[in-house]
Amino acid sequence: MVRRPLSIRARFLLVSLAIVPVALALAGLFFTSLFTANLQRRIEAELAGHINNLAASIHFQPDGRLARPTSTLDHRFSKAYGGLYWQIDDEAMQTQLRSESLWDVALALPGSPPGDGAVHHHELAGPGGTRLLTQERRIIVNSPTGKRSLRIAVAADRQPLDDAGRAFVLDILPYIAGLAAILILASLVQVTWGLRPLATLKDGLDRIREHRGGRLDTVLPKEFTPVEAALNRLLDSQAQAIGKARTRSGDLAHGLKTPLTVLANDALRIREAGEAEIADEIDHLVSVMRTHVERELVRSRIAASAEMRQSDGDLAKVIAEVVRTLKRTAGGEALDWCIDLPRSLMLPVDPHDLRELAGNLVENAVKWGRSTIRIRWRPAGVGGSLVIEDDGPGVDAGKISSMTRRGVRHDEQEPGTGLGLSIVQEICDVYGLALVIENREPCGLRVSVAFGSA
């Protein structure tokens, strides 16, 4: 069994489910990185300010030793392991000053930085296994002993930076999830709205199939204009082909009727000339060929399929036309007609085919009926059945199954070709109708044709 491919809507939804979360996750990472980078730049700017403050507050004791800075600094410098640290190295005197926050720990600065006076950035190990964002700068200052080179470093614990990044992620996560749901829903709405013209196209094709129109006349977006034009060309071509085929079939059958009539007359002359055996054989062949011609004339008018019917048939109108015609026949004038049909009951059968079906069934009932013909509609669910009953002799139970075979006649004394019920069966096969033939009690025949929907 061939597996049906996914619908367009399902494909768009799957793509949205795959792409939207990934895109938003990348956007979340980008915004988190941007937030962290901006926060880190702010911390680095703060560290640079502390370096400048420390540099501005440097002074020396009379003996040339470096004195502790006296400028007001951040209170975290005074709290042990408070997360903010400074350190000044006097390389000439081999001395080092540290903030109270470092307590008994010294910053492990890398080798001597270049003497360009620029600020250099490091990430170093800090107290308690922490990681520190560190800035250092080498400056040259005047001292009682001459110019001295000092190395000033300020560091901040990066844990608050990492915590802020995680908190930012947790804060924006619900918004990202909500945005993902909105985008997926919007994608689904967009696809549904975008594919709506397909539903319009389907409705137009359904109208054609139900014979409420012959061409697509819906207003579709310009992207569907080539499809609409192609379908209309196909429908026009198909209608022309069907019309030509029916016309040629009918012309062929009509063209054979005249030669058959000539052959029948020739057989009559041959019989009068004493060649009865040859005349009988010609009469038999003419009868067989005339039966085929009559059948093909009828078949040329039957729709090839239910979808190719010209329109739906009005049951009450068709039955009225058939009864009006048969009442004028010798057999129909002597019968009582009991007709019980709903008005304006449209059946999904071409009017010509419905007339052919009903005409053969009613004509058969008239042929065998003695006093009464009853025609009624029997509703059943979403459909119903056309029931035609007569009060004739009925049919042997063993012969009912063969009544719809082509050319079968159960009474050779009655005129006919034996094609009536076979044509009815063929029409039923085309439209998917159920034909049931059964004897009535105490006498007569009942024929019902079940329609799936009406």
Image (cartoon, helix red, strand yellow):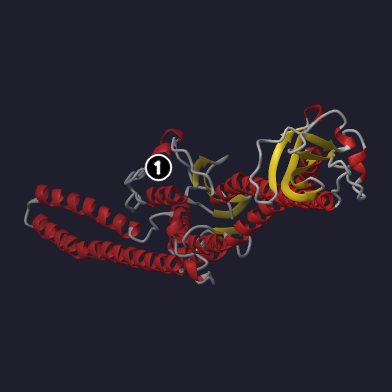
Q: Secondary structure at mark 1?
A: loop
Q: Amino acid at mark 1?
A: Met
Residue occupying image coordinates x 86% and y 48%: 59
Q: Is residue 405 visible?
A: yes
Q: Is residue 216 visible?
A: no
Residue 344, quarter of picture: bottom right
Task: Where is residue 211? Give x, y as percent.
Answer: 50, 64
Determine crowd level at label 1: few under 14, some 14-19, many 20+ residues with C-alpha closer than 10 A.
some
Task: Where is residue 313? Give x, y as percent.
Answer: 51, 62
411 vs 248, left or right, is right
277 vs 88, left or right, is left
Quadrant where the C terminus is found in the figure: bottom right
Task: Where is residue 260? Give x, y as percent.
Answer: 18, 60
Q: Is residue 194 above or below residue 125?
A: below
How many numbered marks does the figure carry?
A: 1
Residue picked out by circle 1: 403
276 vs 348, left or right, is left
Q: Is residue 227 above or below residue 307?
A: below
Residue closer to the observer: 133 or 139 = 139
Residue occupying image coordinates x 52% and y 44%: 6
